[in-house]
Image (cartoon, rainbow, N blue to C red):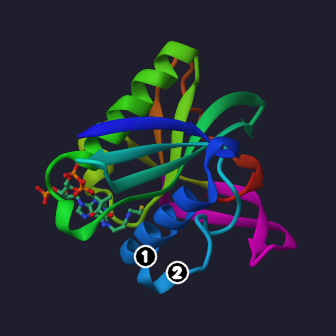
Amino acid sequence: MQIEEKIEYDINPQLHDEITRLRNDCFPEHSTNRSYFKQLPHFRFLAYEEGLLVGQMGIDHRVISVGESVFSIFGVIDLCVSSSYRNRGIATALLEQLSALAREKGIDFLFLVADDYRLYEKNGFQPVSTSLTWLRIDEHKNYGVGMERIENELMIKQTGKKVWPDEPVDLLGYLF
Ligand SMILES: CC(C)(COP(=O)(O)OP(=O)(O)OC[C@H]1O[C@@H](n2cnc3c(N)ncnc32)[C@H](O)[C@@H]1OP(=O)(O)O)[C@@H](O)C(=O)NCCC(=O)NCCS
């Protein structure tokens, strides 16, 4: 298996189509005619088996505020692996490579939204419950700022020296 890192603007229309097919196979309930659900990511990790795209993960590089702290994060978006290639460690490899990149580049935390913790706990993430502020987006329209207490759907992984405080989180953008 090979993992390729791609800046979003280097993804050509054919590759966008391949990612779209993979996303729709993996998230049939959120099927779309585009390669992203809400917004373009900044870059992606793409996993290939013998030239075939079998896994993908979008990543947003952002600063967020948690109480009085400001953290740089990699937000993980639409991590998915083609159904016939699951349980071979592909998602784990994508997360490991992202963790290594984050450590190397001085990113404070990885951040994601999940209702099933299994993959992420195995890969060093922990759940957080917090008051969350974010920009609501649906089908390329924003619906203003959401503010809600979110219990156990957010997960973080420390990749720098900073410690996550138990404080309200402002995502300074949309929820991945
Ligand atoms: C979740 C997913 C990316 C895992 O990919 P993978 O390459 O099979 O993952 P790995 O082989 O590295 O690890 C397998 C482990 O993932 C965990 N897992 C399986 N499905 C999962 C899911 N939907 N969410 C979280 N963890 C999951 C299991 O613990 C599994 O190990 P186990 O069966 O021994 O308990 C893949 O099942 C997928 O694409 N699912 C559909 C899309 C999806 O739900 N994405 C996650 C969005 S948050």
Q: Is residue 104 or residue 122 the one in the foreground?
A: 104
Q: Quadrant of ligand 1?
A: bottom left
Magenta segment range?
Answer: 131-154
Residue at image coords 51%, 69%: 20
Q: Residue at x 35, y 55 (%)?
A: 53
Measure the alpha-carbon separation of dots 1 and 2. 5 Å
Tell me: residue 116, above or below residue 167: below
Residue drawn 15% across and 56% down?
Answer: 87
Above-or-below relation of 12 to 114: above
**Residue 80 magenta-drawn?**
no
* Mark 1 and mark 2 residues within 8 Å of each other at the beta carbon: yes
Q: Residues within 10 Å of mark 2 (few under 14, many from 20)?
A: few
Comparing 158 with 102, the one in front is 102
Amino acid type at circle 1 is Phe
Q: Is residue 133 magenta?
A: yes
Quarter occupied by the C terminus? bottom right
Crowdedness of circle 1 by 10 Å Cα count: few (<14), some, many (20+)? some
Asked whether mark 1 lies closer than 8 Å to ligand 1, one says yes
Tell me the SS state at disc 1.
Answer: loop
Residue type at mark 2?
His
Q: Quick check: 74 left or right of 131?
A: left
Q: Which mark is residue 6?
A: none
Task: Name the main secondary structure of what is drawn in magenta.
Answer: strand
Quick one: 22 or 120, which is closer to the camera?
Answer: 22
For mark 2, what is the residue? Answer: 30
Q: Is residue 128 visible?
A: no
Q: Residue at x 58, y 16 (%)?
A: 106
Q: Which mark is residue 27?
A: 1
